[in-house]
């Protein structure tokens, strides 16, 4: 006879889920899905491909969010029934299944709880991540590529669409920089806490044996704005350069000058794009990212000006937001939240949810 008792755990999950439903506002979500479904069913939808993609993507995100919320109630009910059956029949296999489902529900509800903290202006937008190698020579370039793989693996594990827009390869190993888009519900709000300077400490595979090397990489996260453009960029403010797409070692992977580099002359912001096959497509994608960066820069400047006018200027916590230590011990630690794990390999393979959740909660506390 089994005595599997998950009553307290299930009750705690139900209590948390009630709070989540109140914040999510299921009625409003259903109304938004109905509106987007109407737009998606319009006969002339695909006359404007870009708009059509935006509508269908938004609809998919909202439907996925609603389905996840609605499925939790029935899963909690099913879990209670499974526990009851396991106890009545003395079935250890059913008990193990119940424990597994409990852990899965705790993860799902925990993720939803964190998502309710994402209430920023652009938190629900897709995210564009740019990674740049910093100080540390070849190790820094290698580290930048490790970080790129880490985020792409994280997206893959969650079933999120990731598109590499541009990659600049270093001569010996790794990358100088890379830009990629992650299209997922609340991608920007979720990943924006990853922005900052990342530090790697390890025994360098490129230098003298037995010598520890510290290297750095910068991670930038911006929201991808809608095609309509929320900020005007005069053509006179832009320099356009075209070149051939290249792969590792500088080898050409395209025989035409389809890659595009936009330089915003007033700010010096540079955006390169070589993912698309045509120059026109690459220019349009680069312009969209440039507009996103300029809008974010404008908002940051406005916020800084408001703080200065209010006399509320505080020192930042420092340039490094996370350390990845591979030698002399194994640890990854976020220096803002104090969240840490002892398995760097798992983190580099995309296990970032703990760091992201801790970062979102830390940011919310700072804002309150």
Image: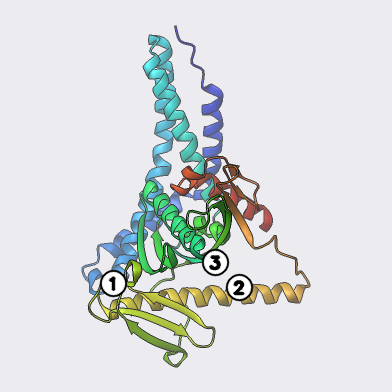
Instruction: Return the residue at label 1.
Output: 276
Q: Residues within 10 Å of mark 2 (few under 14, many from 20)?
A: few
Mark 3 or 1, nearer chain start: 3
| Image quarter in which the C terminus is found | bottom right
Determine the secondary structure under disc 2.
helix
Disc 2/disc 3 C-alpha distance (Å): 23 Å
Q: Nearer the viewer, mark 3 or mark 1?
A: 3
Determine the secondary structure under disc 3.
loop
- Label pair 3/1, CB-CB below 8 angstroms: no
| Image quarter in which the N terminus is found | top left
Q: Residue furthest top?
A: 1
Q: Nearer the viewer, mark 2 or mark 3?
A: 3
Q: Which mark is residue 300?
A: 2
Q: Is residue 233 above or below residue 154?
A: below
Determine the secondary structure under disc 1.
loop
Residue at 59% x, 52% y: name it: 323
Q: Is residue 314 above or below residue 206?
A: below
Mark 2 or 3, nearer chain start: 3
Q: Residue furthest bottom?
A: 236
Instruction: Return the residue at label 3.
Output: 134
Front position in the image: 13 or 355: 355
Front position in the image: 263 or 49: 263
Residue at 46% x, 79% y: name it: 270
Q: Residue 180: x percent and y percent?
A: 40, 64
Q: Residues within 10 Å of mark 1 (few under 14, many from 20)?
A: some
Disc 3/disc 1 C-alpha distance (Å): 27 Å
Residue at 57% x, 53% y: name it: 211
Q: Is residue 233 above or below residue 344?
A: below
Disc 2/disc 1 C-alpha distance (Å): 30 Å
């Amino acid at each position: 006879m089994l005595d599997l008792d998950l009553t307290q755990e299930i009750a705690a999950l139900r209590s948390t889920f009630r709070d989540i439903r109140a914040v999510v506002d299921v009625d409003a979500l259903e109304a938004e899905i109905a509106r987007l479904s109407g737009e998606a069913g319009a006969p002339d939808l695909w006359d404007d491909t870009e708009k059509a993609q935006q509508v269908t993507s938004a609809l998919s995100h909202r439907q996925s969010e609603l389905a996840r919320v609605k499925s939790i109630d029935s899963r909690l009910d099913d879990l209670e029934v499974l526990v009851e059956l396991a106890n009545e029949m003395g079935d250890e296999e059913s008990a193990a299944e119940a424990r597994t489902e409990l852990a899965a529900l705790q993860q799902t509800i925990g993720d939803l709880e964190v998502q309710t903290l994402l209430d920023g202006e652009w938190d629900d937008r897709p995210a564009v991540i740019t990674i740049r190698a910093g100080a540390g020579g070849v190790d820094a370039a290698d580290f930048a590529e490790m970080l790129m793989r880490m985020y792409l693996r994280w997206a893959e594990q969650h079933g999120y669409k990731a598109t590499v827009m541009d990659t600049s390869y270093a001569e010996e190993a790794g990358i100088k920089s890379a830009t990629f888009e992650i299209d997922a519900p609340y991608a920007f709000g979720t990943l924006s806490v990853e922005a900052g300077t990342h530090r790697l400490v390890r025994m360098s595979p490129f230098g003298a044996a037995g010598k520890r090397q510290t290297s750095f990489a910068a991670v930038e996260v911006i929201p991808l704005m809608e095609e309509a453009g929320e900020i005007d960029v005069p053509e006179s403010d832009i320099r356009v350069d075209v070149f051939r797409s290249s792969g590792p070692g500088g080898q050409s992977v395209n025989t035409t000058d389809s890659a595009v580099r936009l330089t915003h002359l007033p700010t010096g912001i540079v955006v390169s794009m070589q993912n698309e096959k045509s120059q026109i497509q690459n220019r349009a994608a680069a312009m969209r990212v440039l507009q996103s960066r300029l809008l974010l820069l404008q908002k940051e400047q406005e916020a800084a000006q408001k703080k200065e006018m209010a006399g509320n200027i505080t020192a930042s916590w420092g340039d490094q937001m996370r350390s990845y230590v591979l030698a002399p011990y194994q640890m990854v630690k976020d220096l803002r939240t104090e969240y840490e794990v002892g398995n760097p390999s798992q983190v580099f393979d995309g296990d970032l949810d703990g760091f992201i959740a801790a970062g979102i909660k830390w940011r919310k506390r700072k804002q309150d």
